[in-house]
Amino acid sequence: MLARIPMKTTPIPFPTIRLAALAAGVLAFAAAIACLHGAEQGDHGPLALKHDDRPVQRDRPEPASFAGVVGRVSTSVVKITTEAKPKHASSDAPQVFGFDDPMFRQFFGGRLPQAPQGPTAGLGSGVIISSDGYIVTNNHVVDGADTLTVTLSDGREFPAKVVGRDPLTDIAVVKVDAAGLPAITFADSSKTEVGDRVLAIGNPFGIGETVTSGIVSATGRQVGILADVKGYENFIQTDAAINPGNSGGALIDIDGRLVGINTAILSHSGGFQGVGLAVPADMVSQVAGNLVEHGKVLRGYLGVNIQRITPELADSFGLKNRDGALVAEVLPNGPAAKAGVQSGDVITSMNGVKVTDPTKVQLAVADLAPGSKIDLEVLRNGKIEHLTAMASERPGPNKADSVADSDDTGVLNGVAVGDIDSDTRQRAEIPQGLQGALITNVDPGSAAARAGLQSGDVILELDRHPVHNAQDAVDLSAKAVDKKTLLKLWTHGSTVFVVVDETGEGKSAS
């Protein structure tokens, strides 16, 4: 049973995931995040990329040497050096995403610390994607830089300007004034399979162009390192050695085609430990094309917060299986709301394609041009409904589609709640108009804690009944007779469903 106690704000801690590397642009991140965005955008017209969509031939013997492939492709990979003027920030300036904590997440290929009074130098890699001078790299390589220099494999150097940046995918496009450059060919990364041989090309530690080999270790990997909205991560994981300075370099297949742009590593030491991450070539192509043509990425938007269906959620909603994506929230006046989508619906099909993974729904919507028709099949109260929405352009991050985590279960004993006053709303950044019961304390040993409930979460519904304040939550929990309780929570800017099970029989679902 819930207990109501006087309001007390409890800080919500960040996760302590250590994704180590050199501080990839972190020194300039907070002060200069908008410095280059749109500064050089202009109307560049469509980007002509070279594509070869054939799958790699997997039944041929592995060659004794990859020298031929490397010789053809290495000229398309460049070194990018950056310089940022000193930023004069006060000592009490806010930190961004805990980047001041060495135990927290960091990209791996950026700024090299210099004396405080001098400019900050940076190092990364890039890939030539068109013969007229367009080069793709990582956003964190160029973010905050005042000057960029591109060095080709033959030693020629060119000043470069930023065409556009996309923090959501950590992709940026820069331009040099040159012609006849050797552009790389894009593979169809959707055909990449675990076990495929790949090569990583870049400039680790600034020692010069370096090639390493490995395999694709996983696809569709999400590790939570990109800023803004969760769900746009779709990394290719590889064990090809990647180190500081490789950011923005090429991950290629054995046919010499671009499979991905090397972006990050997971490491306890700061150096490579066998887990490298690359943005897939298909995503790079789409993002780069938008950045060149529009100066920004035009993403489709549905206006929903969706989540994976756990066994406990399937049981609570009376679902026969875990297929589909559960709609936790429908944002007001968005395309989904206008189409009649409701919270609690399960999206089972989108544009004729069966939905098996909520993240793929978000990525598929993002790939749609604004104005595109979205045919949805949803399961509502055991019946199939057919709805049609029109994708709009994705708004700012606070109102974007998102995929939420809610894979744990627990009980309500040990949870204390309070009302939301104006001061609490401001400190916890709770949206205006959002009503509910604010969780002020969770017993660390309780099943509620194991379910993932935290101080700062807001209970919006309890067993499908709306909760307007703390007293509502107390009253509804007192009336509950079932051992399992379905909660609808607002947490960390997203709305999710969570099942709590006071029998203690529930277990986390991956």
Image (cartoon, rainbow, N blue to C red):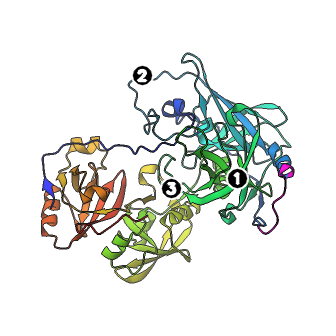
Quarter-wise, where is residue 248 in the image? top right
Of pointers 3 and 1, the one earlier in the residue sequence: 1
Q: What is the spatial separation of the Cα atoms under label 3 and label 1, in whole angstroms?
A: 37 Å
The mark found on residue 197 in the picture is: none
Q: Is residue 64 magenta?
A: yes
Asked if residue 50 lies left or right of residue 11, the reply is right
Q: What is the spatial separation of the Cα atoms under label 3 and label 2, in whole angstroms?
A: 34 Å
Q: What secondary structure is found at the residue carrying circle 1?
A: strand
Q: Is residue 369 visible?
A: no
Asked if residue 239 lies left or right of residue 71, the reply is left
State which quarter of the image contains the N terminus. bottom left
Q: Residue at x 57, y 39 (%)?
A: 37
Q: Residue at x 73, y 58 (%)?
A: 197
The residue range painted magenta reads 58-68
The mark found on residue 394 in the picture is: 3
**Frontmost residue, 43 versus 207:** 207
Circle 1 sits on which residue? Answer: 214
Q: Amino acid at mark 3?
A: Arg
The mark found on residue 90 in the picture is: 2
State which quarter of the image contains the C terminus. bottom left
Q: What secondary structure is found at the residue carrying circle 3?
A: loop
Q: Residue at x 78, y 36 (%)?
A: 177
Q: Which residue lies most toward the top here? A: 117
